[in-house]
Image (cartoon, rainbow, N blue to C red):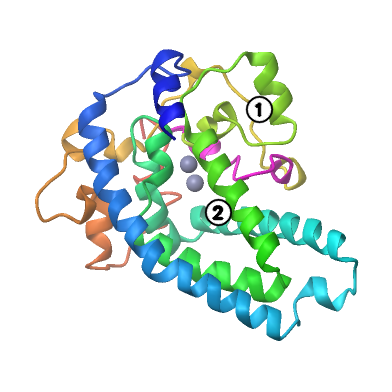
């Protein structure tokens, strides 16, 4: 992470729209809550699911009676495919979007955005991970390998490092890269509703949700309704200083986030 943080300052892909330090404060507070939730809930839940899966091999890859190596590869691929579905659901289901938009509110995109998740989303992701492990029948080695790839590529795709275009284009044939995920963080609704893949980029091609990489200067990162600097400041007492996070503590009937102000096209 430290290497990416330095590199993205030296060779930046997108020009920063806001000062770095106020963003870092918000991202740090959000990250502490997210990482605490991960330690308290995600780890024990994943360990329990892996234990259950090893004792009761009822998952998909066990039922198919495949060689261990094939099971490993299939588990890895299915973990990534199903996480694509989870990410798309976070955008399409209003309840999940109330949490996931905390990640998208960042007005700039860099490696610190990779940690900026609402703790509620982290908790729900833990439940989804349990479901993935049990239904797919993931072994502990396959789970650890996927988690490693997942975390590493999450850092990479959020970084603001400008890679040579030819290199990034080649990497993007297989992996989600900074230009590809940058499109997903655009304020344009059609862009946000695309490029959901996390590790392998081909799931978007498969589901026809791929938006081709755009020149970085055409991407405006964030969510229009929360773009004003006054809505990005840390405020004492607010949960992670992010408006939707605070709203979640006092739920109300909300219009679909896909049509309300949170992802409305610019100018709407
Ligand atoms: Zn997203
Ligand atoms: Zn992201």
| The one of 266 and 170 positioned closer to us in this rendering | 170
So how many labels did they put on this image?
Answer: 2
Q: Is residue 259 above or below residue 8?
A: below
The image quadrant where one finds the C terminus is top left
Q: Position of residue 54 (x, y in %)?
A: 69, 79
Which residue is painted at 85% across and 59% down in the image? 69
Mark 1 or mark 2, earlier in chain: 2
How far apart marks 1 and 2 lie (CA) works out to 19 Å
**The stretch drawn in magenta includes residue 195:** yes
Which residue is painted at 80% across and 56% down in the image? 73
Taking the view exactly as shown, the residue that stands out farthest to the front is: 141
- Residue 260 visible? The answer is no
Q: Quadrant of residue 66?
A: bottom right
Q: Which residues are magenta?
A: 186-204
Taking the view exactly as shown, the residue that stands out farthest to the left is: 236
Q: Position of residue 186 (x, y in %)?
A: 46, 32
Q: Which residue is mark 1?
A: 212
- Residue 265 visible? The answer is yes
**The stretch drawn in magenta includes residue 148:** no
Q: Which residue is mark 2?
A: 87
Q: Is residue 172 above or below residue 123?
A: above
Q: Secondary structure at mark 1?
A: loop
Callout 1: few (<14), some (14-19), or many (20+) C-alpha neighbours within 10 Å? few
- Relative placement, left or right, of 187 versus 201 is left
- Relative placement, left or right, of 78 versus 98 is right
Residue 119: give its label.
none
The image quadrant where one finds the N terminus is top left
Mark 2 sits near ligand 1, with its Cβ under 8 Å away: yes
Main SS, magenta region, reads: loop
């Amino acid at each position: 992470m430290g290497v990416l943080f330095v590199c993205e300052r030296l060779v930046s892909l997108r020009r920063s729209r806001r000062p770095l330090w106020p963003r870092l404060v918000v991202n740090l507070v959000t990250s502490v809550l997210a990482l605490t939730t991960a330690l308290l809930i995600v780890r024990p839940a994943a360990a329990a699911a892996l234990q259950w899966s090893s004792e009761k091999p009822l998952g998909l890859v066990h039922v198919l009676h495949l060689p261990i190596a094939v099971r490993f590869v299939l588990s890895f691929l299915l973990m990534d495919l199903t996480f694509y579905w989870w990410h798309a659901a976070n955008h399409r289901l209003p309840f999940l979007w109330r949490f996931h938009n905390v990640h998208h509110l960042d007005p700039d995109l860099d490696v610190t955005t990779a940690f900026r998740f609402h703790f509620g989303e982290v908790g729900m992701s833990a439940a989804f991970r349990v479901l993935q492990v049990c239904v797919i029948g993931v072994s502990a080695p396959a789970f650890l390998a996927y988690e490693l790839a997942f975390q590493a590529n999450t850092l990479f795709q959020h970084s603001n490092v400008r890679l040579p275009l030819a290199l990034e284009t080649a990497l993007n044939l297989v992996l989600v890269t900074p230009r590809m995920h940058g499109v997903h963080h655009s304020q344009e609704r059609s862009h946000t509703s695309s490029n959901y893949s996390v590790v392998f980029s081909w799931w978007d091609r498969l589901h026809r949700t791929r938006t081709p990489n755009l020149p970085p200067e055409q991407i405006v990162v964030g969510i229009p309704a929360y773009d004003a600097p006054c809505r990005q400041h840390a405020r004492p007492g607010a949960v992670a200083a992010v408006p939707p996070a605070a709203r979640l503590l006092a739920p109300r009937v909300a219009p679909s986030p896909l049509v309300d102000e949170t992802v409305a096209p610019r100018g709407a």
